[in-house]
Image (cartoon, rainbow, N blue to C red):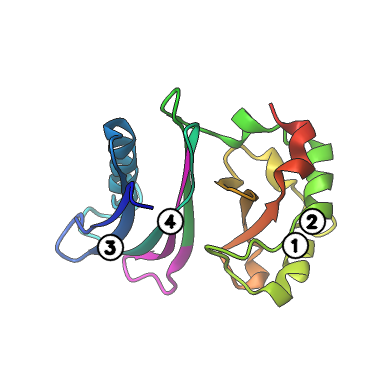
Amino acid sequence: DDSITMLVYTEAPNKNSSVEIQYPQFKNNDALNAMVYDKVQSLAQIDTSLFSSDARLNIDYQADVTLNNNKVVSIIFWGPSSIDDAAYSTNNLITMNVDLHSMKELNLKDLYTTNADFQAVFFEKAMFPENPVTSYDKASFPEMLKLQSPEYQTVDPFSIEGNVKFFLKPDGIVFSLPAVHATGSDHFEAQLKYSDIQQFYL
C-alpha cells in the first residue's frame, strides 16, 4: 500500500531502556498520524506510579495496518516488552481502531452489543485468524478457544470494560482476549465473520 509508510519509534524514556516500535504513517492524513504518534509515545512510557523513572524498559513491537478504507483504520502493534529486569517479558498485542469521520478511537461497545447471545455466537463460530498475528498455532486453536469459554472461566470476558481488544480485517473482526495463564500465552485471538455477528452491530 503506497499510502502507508512504516517508521520506527526508538525514543527510550531513559538510558537504561531500549525501545523499538514500528508504526504506520499515512499519506495526506495529519490528524491520523498525530493520533498514531501519540499512541506510540504512550506505549514507550514508564508508569512511574509503579516503577522508578530510571527503570529498564525494553520494547520491541511490530505493527500492521489490518484495515484501511474511507471509514475506518485498524492498526495493531505486537511483540515483547519487559520492565526492570522482570523474569519474563510479556507478549503484548495493542489495537487501535480509528473512526475517520469523528477521528476518535472506537471501542468494542461502539460497534457491537456484546451480550450473552453475542458470547454464545463467539464461542460457536470463532475461527483461527491466520494472519497477521496469533500467539499459538492452528492445531491448538480449538483447545485454546475452549479454555476461554464459560465452562472454564468464571467471568465472561466480554463483560469487563476494555478487557477484549479487537481489530478489523477485510474478511472479519479479530478479538484478542487475555489468555488463561495455563495456556502459556499472554493473549488469545479468534476471528468472526462480519456476517456471523451482523445482528449485534450497532
Residue 113: x %, y % from top left: 72, 31
The disc, 3 or 2, on the residue closer to the chain's N-terminal end is 3
Residue 49: x %, y % from top left: 33, 45
The disc, 2 or 4, on the residue closer to the chain's N-terminal end is 4
Q: Amino acid at mark 1?
A: Leu
Residue plotted at (66% across, 63% down): 180
Front disc: 2 or 4: 4
Residue plotted at (34% across, 43% down): 39
The disc, 3 or 1, on the residue closer to the chain's N-terminal end is 3
Residue 184: x %, y % from top left: 60, 73
Residue identifier under label 4: 64
Viewer-closest of 2 and 168: 2
The disc, 1 or 4, on the residue closer to the chain's N-terminal end is 4
Residue identifier under label 3: 20
Residue identifier under label 2: 149
Residue identifier under label 1: 145
From which residue to which does the magenta span run? Answer: 73-91
Q: Amino acid at mark 2?
A: Ser
Look at the numbered disc 1 and give the secondary structure of its residue. Answer: helix
Number of residues whose C-alpha sits closer than 10 Å to that of mark 3, classed few (under 14), some (14–19) or many (20 or more): some
Q: Amino acid at mark 4?
A: Asp
